[in-house]
Amino acid sequence: MSLPASDINAKADQRTTMDLGAVLPMTAQVESHHLVIGGVDMVDLARSQGTALYVYDEADIRQRMRDYRLSFASVYPDSGIIYASKAFLNKALVRIAAEEGMNLDVSGGGELAVARAAGFPMDRVFVHGNNKTQVELEEAISAGVGRIVVDSRIELERVESIAAQHGIVQDVFMRITPGVEADTHEYIRTGCEDSKFGFTMRDDWAFRCVKDVLAAPHVRLVGLHMHIGSQIFALHSYDEAIAVIVEFMRRIKETYGVEIKELDVGGGVGVAYLADDKPATIKDFADVVSDSVTRHCNAFGLTLPRLLCEPGRSIVACAGVTLYTVGILKTLPGIRKYVAIDGGMSDNVRTALYHADYEATIANKADEPRSEIVTLCGKHCESGDAVVLDGSLQHPEIGDIACVFGTGAYCRSMSSNYNGQPRPAVVFVKDGHARVVTRRETYDDLMACDIDEECAR
Ligand SMILES: Cc1ncc(COP(=O)(O)O)c(C=O)c1O
């Protein structure tokens, strides 16, 4: 794997940090040349906590959770927001989600375990996944989760049998694949026909399975779910998918006399990774999906269901940044300039995976124009290991603190120990205070699961 060819004639955009707009965490400021987030100096924080370091603006996370709740409540009173914990999860975040009135989407036993350990109310948990194991389903049902989003006919049988053993009736959603191609990267498109997720509409399979769900005595069908993809800018795809799902609701009512009470339209709202990106706002999303659900339900005379959505990225991505220390500089004449940082694809695999874009700044020169084009490359043994490809940056020097914006979603949660790299700590900043909410891994953590065979004998 190698990097795409650079455009060596590309011009740095000259913008300074505070010109980066929507990419910045809400409380970002520049004071005495330094980047400050949540009232905390990022240069001092990097020096005291070490780098690489994930930093989250707590006020920003809380504000976006509130924006979701209020934007939906103002146009669709019977609504709820489910935070998609795959975007970023630790116990501190779970507690914030609980305080802000979120429900929680967990995919699998590990995320459920974190939610339980943090004391999240289990009746507000939605369990996802296209291949939940028997053990994970047992854990979820015995924990008393609110909803299991059933992804296949085989899984339905498993849920029915486990619920029967527990002597309960489990509330479930059916995940429907609406056959809509959302306008986003193919790796994060999930609602199209060729998808491993959900019940396909092909050959009317999804509808044929409804009778099995309704006939299962230990399962109650309370809702339908769709999720068409992630990092979506064009909201019309939601209307197309909702039209398909509401028509499905109409057929269920007409055929079985059952009204679907809850509809989860998934997550996927895009965020600004580059200063010129113009994603839809949370309010735009709330307006489009509530109008769509209302319009399509009214057209069929259906009672309006409770409306749920499941955002992850649009809550945490821009609240988070990653700090690194610049260690090595290499200029390859006519090719590109490499600025090597003390992290890379182990803490942020998105660039290596999808050539994701990011904006960066040098936190100790935050008021200077970003006058050079450089590639922030990592320290790992892959040529494709980079975090920022040919991006604008101030003149870099060894020891500078580089800050990459927009790394709050799908970075920590997709991180690895590649090359024996301990995962960075996570720090939440707010009102001038920094608190470490997940400590940095140690070398001992890297070996914590290894069995010392000499001692075992
Ligand atoms: C089922 C489901 N719900 C919600 C989400 C969250 O999506 P996003 O982070 O784009 O809002 C995802 C992520 O792809 C998902 O798979």
Image (cartoon, rainbow, N blue to C red):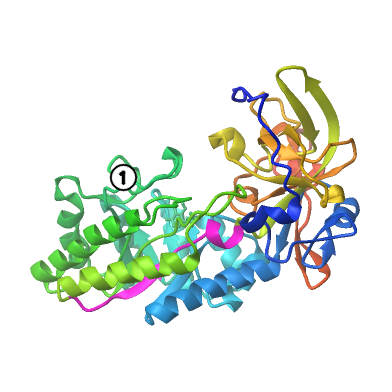
Question: In the rendered view, would you say 417 is above or below 294?
Answer: above
Question: Residue 309 in magenta?
Answer: yes
Q: Is residue 295 above or below residue 329?
A: below
Question: Dot 1 surroundings within 10 Å: few (below 14), some, or many (20 or more)?
Answer: many
Of the pair 125 and 350, the residue shown nearer to us = 350
Residue 389 pos. (x, y %): 65, 33
x, y percentage for residue 228?
A: 37, 52
Residue pictured at 56% horizontal, 71% vertical: 65
Which residue in the structure is indicated by mark 1? 192
Q: Residue furthest top?
A: 333
Q: Quadrant of the N terminus?
A: top right
The vertical placement of 122 against 273, above or below, is below
Image position of 362 with respect to 420: above or below: below
What residue is rendered at 49% in x and 66% in y?
282
Q: Circle 1 — which element?
A: loop
Taking 270 as reference, is 95 left or right? right
In the picture, the quarter occupied by the C terminus is: top right
User: Magenta residues, as a range?
Assistant: 302-316
374 or 182: nearer the viewer: 374
Q: Is residue 431 left or right of residue 307?
A: right
